[in-house]
Image (cartoon, helix red, strand yellow):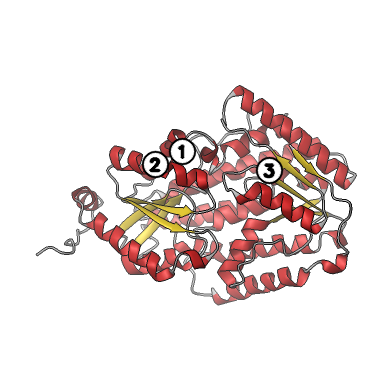
Amino acid sequence: MTVSKPPHRPDSGNQQPLDLQSMVEGLRQSIKALDGKSQLQATAGCLELVAKSIEQAIHAKENGNFCAGHSTQFPIEVFWPLGIMPLCNELYSTIDRIIGDNRSSQFLLVPDFVVYSSSACDPARNGRDTAARAMGVPSFGLDRPCKIFTPQSIDYWLKEHLALIRFLEEQTGRRMDYDYLKEVAQLSCRATQVYREINELRGAVPCPMPAEAAFAPMAVYRAWAGTQTCVDYLEQLRDELGERVAKGVGAVPQEKFRYTCATSPPFFDAGIMAKLEQRHGAVNVMDHDQWWRENADWLIDPEDPLAGLAYRVQFEPSNSLYGTATDHAEEVRQAALKCKADGVVHFNDVGIRHAAGGYRILKDTIERSLGLPWATIDCDRLDKSSATYDGVMDQFDVFFETIENSKPYQDRFRQRGQQTHEPRGTA
């Protein structure tokens, strides 16, 4: 537990709500541009919900609410009963990269306080505390245990969540409504179950999920977890994907390659995955930022919602980065196996040393146990300067050529009932 209480906060004139409003307007323009061009109705729905989440943060104070700047993998469900609107720095930085080119890594609106959890992403902990001090607002850090599912770590993690509640109550002057939190936890658990159903549909051949909606479940879940809005959206997306699976409609007319991401997708250029669909007939069937473990029923005791939410944060996608490298490798293997991948891509983010340090174990596990080709691409999640678009695409060209020339792939391709293309470089 880390608590920071600065002596003062900046005058409200230092806030920059217009920057966030411009982001909202950019999202709305993107929605208009999608009219009649997107494969899924849920694509526009995701952008609209992200825009609404930003707007509710902008207008939190005038609506009698509070605004909390927070990191990813954080239990935002505890915000709703206290009238706190979430503002996720990473989510909005990602959107900024999609619709703009500002490389924004700062909070574009001064929140009432900053909360975060210790994360496998190196900048997350110190960055949030430093940002809070610079803005002159209080902060609280959840100290996440390393071993994620031992009784000792779960007990310690629950105590951290109880301390978080005390901090939020102190900042808002309100008491936690635990009856309301029970409803929130049940909605969040329901959303998790639907999320897993979406993941199962992504494993269908051909994969129904196009690149345009690859980030959609994660974006909506992280902005709206614990609300009926989140459940409704994920159910809409699930039903739309289910209809495509029933009709045999895939993300591309002729699906040729299926790949998973061992870490996060390429946030620094959202067009990469769409280009791979066009250029190679290659579809992203799963990424580790959205892969849930087998059993999504994490709300063991509905009468103890905070314990359930603490478990959920340990249970959710990317959680295996907090455990051992072998556990992480097994989850990556399971995702590749369940989603029938032809290869695995590791976007080697320089800001996540845990993943970078353990990638060789992941690579060996995938290649030895599944016989799948592996590609490591050095990059940064948001900063395009560390990896050029052409350089990344050149690496993908080699990657898919390697897959195509492998006998295991040719055998799988035939078994899928598709006509095998003759490998490049052969007579």
Name the quarter where the C terminus is drawn: bottom left
Q: Find residue 312 and report its horizontal and vertical position in percent.
A: 62, 37
- Direction from residue 107 to residue 47 in the image, left or right: left
- Please state which amino acid type lies under the numbered disc 3: Pro
Spatial CA span between label 2 and label 3: 28 Å
Taking depth in this image into account, of 108 and 39 the one nearest to the observer is 108
Measured in 3D between alpha carbons, the distance from the residue under mark 2 to the one under mark 1, in whole angstroms, is 8 Å
Q: Earlier in the sequence, mark 3 or mark 1?
A: 3
Between 93 and 9, the one nearer to me in the picture? 9
Out of 295 and 71, give the one closest to the viewer: 71
Q: Rate crowding at label 3 as few (under 14), some (14 to 19) or many (20 or more) other CA atoms within 10 Å.
A: many
Can residue 387 be seen in this snapshot? yes
What amino acid type is highlighted by mark number 1? His
Q: Mark 2 sits on what residue?
A: 362
Q: In this view, does 249 lie above or below 389?
A: above
Residue tagged 3: 75
Q: Is residue 269 visible?
A: no
Q: Which residue is drawn at 49% across and 69% down?
A: 38
Residue 17: percent from left, percent from top: 77, 68
Left or right: 113, with 420 as reference point: right
Which element type, helix, strand or loop, lies under badge 2? helix
Number of marks in the rendered image:
3
In the visual, does 228 lie left or right of 369? right
Nearer mark to the viewer, of 2 and 3: 2
- Amino acid identity at mark 2: Leu
Mark 1, residue position:
328
Asked whether disc 2 touches disc 1, contact meaning CB atoms under 8 Å apart, the reply is yes
Q: Which residue is drawn at 51% across and 41% down?
A: 292
The answer to whether 404 is drawn above or below residue 318 in the figure is below
Q: Do the residues labelled 2 and 3 touch (CB within 8 Å)?
A: no
Residue at the left extreme of this rendering? 427
